[in-house]
Amino acid sequence: MFLWGLYIDPLYLVLFFATLIISGAAQLYIRSTFSDWSGVSSSGGLAGEQIGERLVLTAAAMTYVAAAVTSILTLLYYISRARRG
């Protein structure tokens, strides 16, 4: 596929958009988790905001895992392209 005079591999575009979708889904999860739990009080002595912050940090960690997975898949893609010649 030629795009503005440059060759762009369609598989690379698939990986790019997959990364974009995963990141967007993680962001939506973070927002919804924080909005759901920020006003809830608990019996454990923690405020709802503190519990919400913990859940948001967990969701942020999942975002980093998703980014790492897509980076590894991109690396494997380029290694396979290099072996094919």
Image (cartoon, helix red, strand yellow):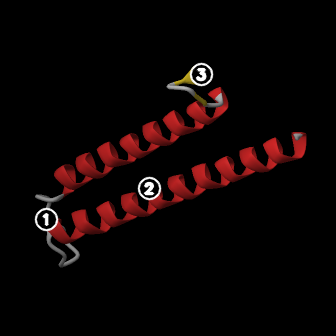
Asked if labels 1 and 2 touch by Cβ distance under 8 angstroms, the answer is: no
Question: Which residue position is annotated with label 2?
Answer: 63
Question: Residue 12 appears at what percent x and percent y?
Answer: 62, 36
Cα distance between the residues tagged 2 and 3? 32 Å
How packed mark 2 is, by other alpha carbons closer than 10 Å (few <14, some 14-19, many 20 or more), is many
Question: Residue 59 appears at what percent x and percent y?
Answer: 38, 58
Disc on res. 41: 1
User: Is 7 on the left-hand or right-hand side of 79?
Assistant: left
Residue found at the far bottom of this picture: 45
Dot 3 or dot 1: first in sequence order is 3
Asked if labels 1 and 3 touch by Cβ distance under 8 angstroms, the answer is: no
Give SS at disc 1: loop
Residue 60, above or below 81: below
Dot 2 or dot 1: first in sequence order is 1
Residue 30, above or below 42: above
Residue found at the far front of this picture: 5
* Residue type, numbered disc 1: Ser
User: Is 6 on the left-hand or right-hand side of 32?
Assistant: right
Disc on res. 2: 3
User: Who is closer to the viewer here, 47 or 33?
Assistant: 33
User: Who is closer to the viewer here, 64 or 41?
Assistant: 64
Residue found at the far left of this picture: 39
* Residue type, numbered disc 2: Thr
Circle 2 or circle 1, nearest the eye: 2
Cα distance between the residues tagged 3 and 1? 56 Å
Question: Residue 56 appears at what percent x and percent y?
Answer: 30, 61
Q: Residue at x 60, y 54 (%)?
A: 71
User: Who is closer to the viewer here, 63 or 37?
Assistant: 63
